[in-house]
Image: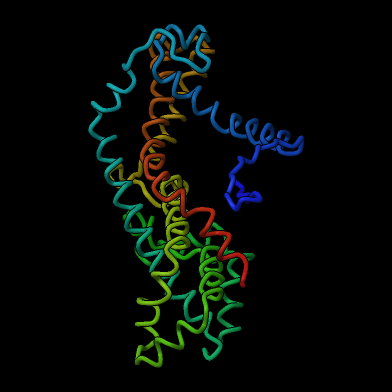
Amino acid sequence: MTAISNKSGKVITEKKRSIWTPGQIVLMIVILIFSLMCLLPFVNVAAVSFSSKSAILRGDVSFWPVEFNTTAYEAIFSDQSMIRSLIYTIIITVVYTVFSMILTILMAYPLTKGRLRGRKFFNFLALFTMYFSGGTIPIYLNIKELGLLDTPWSLILPGMLSTYNMIILKSFFSALPKELEEAAIIDGANDFQVLLRVYLPLSMASLATLTLFYAVGKWNSFQDALYYISTKAYQPLQLKLYHIIKGSQAVDVAALEGGASTVATSVSESIEPATIIFATLPILVVYPFVQRYFVAGVTIGAVKG
């Protein structure tokens, strides 16, 4: 709306017409194509999970369920090990995310202070771990020597601090006005109180973004459990999904060789996509609640004003 005054002094408002330029149209088309490329595979998996066994075997399912049924989901929810694995994975993800955020905050905040002795050295140590790693075998041997093999702590303690996330939060803290910290110090606040009462309340967007990074990364990980966990009670949901996919592939190979029944093949075809949806849905439910902080948290921390 724009305001225009006439000779008599009256204000006349007229609406602005929104004009789409060719560049904006092309950009929207490109974004739509990429969005469909990300969305349609998930839609296909969901459609297969709700389709009948015969429709899956015929290859009739695309983006809409054919001969709708919920047999695969009934089999999943009747399996108590899947429910226990889901609850266990949620607990592991929450504990890991909380500990990771605490460590990230406690490392990022001091590194923004010029008065910290050895700050460049600590920065170098953190950056060094981004480019160089001991490798899988030394890490495994280290976990074994610490007595963490086949325990839930082997899924929590290793990799609990992400240098990349720490740098994002450090940049965000550095961009905050120094006058706020100085005012708090004049009022008698120490460094810990400045962190809790000044920095953290102003950094909610960045903290929510990093929390999402940590939670999604841990929820989707299965390689650490594959290396360190052998007891079924300690296997997270993604590792069970990995075993299910491997089992379905074995059934497919046996079917090609004539050693598997049609029933076994159809069960593997329907259980696999249903398990993928079952394992993916919880994190999709959480994402919309922190999505609004995502862009602000990354962009504000990326540029120092």
- Using the image as rendered, state which of residue 166 and residue 171 is in the foreground: 171
Image point 54% across, 13% down: which residue? 256
Answer with the quarter of the image where residue 17 lies.
Answer: top right
Q: Identify the residue at the far right of this view.
A: 22
Out of 302 and 256, give the one closest to the viewer.
302
Residue farthest front in this picture = 8
Q: Nearer the viewer, residue 305 or 101?
A: 305
Which residue occupies 48% across, 81% down? 110
Measuring from the top left, give residue 75's x and y in whole percent. Answer: 29, 22
Horizontal and vertical percent position of residue 289: 39, 47
Question: In the image, 38: left or right of 57?
Answer: right
Q: Depth check: 19 or 31 in front?
A: 19
Occupied quadrant, residue 96: bottom left
Where is 165 relative to 191, above or below? above
135 to 42, vertically: above or below: below
Apparent side of residue 193 relative to residue 33 in the rendered image (left or right): left
Question: Measured from the top left, where is residue 299 in percent x and y?
Answer: 58, 60
Q: Residue at x 59, y 45 (%)?
A: 12
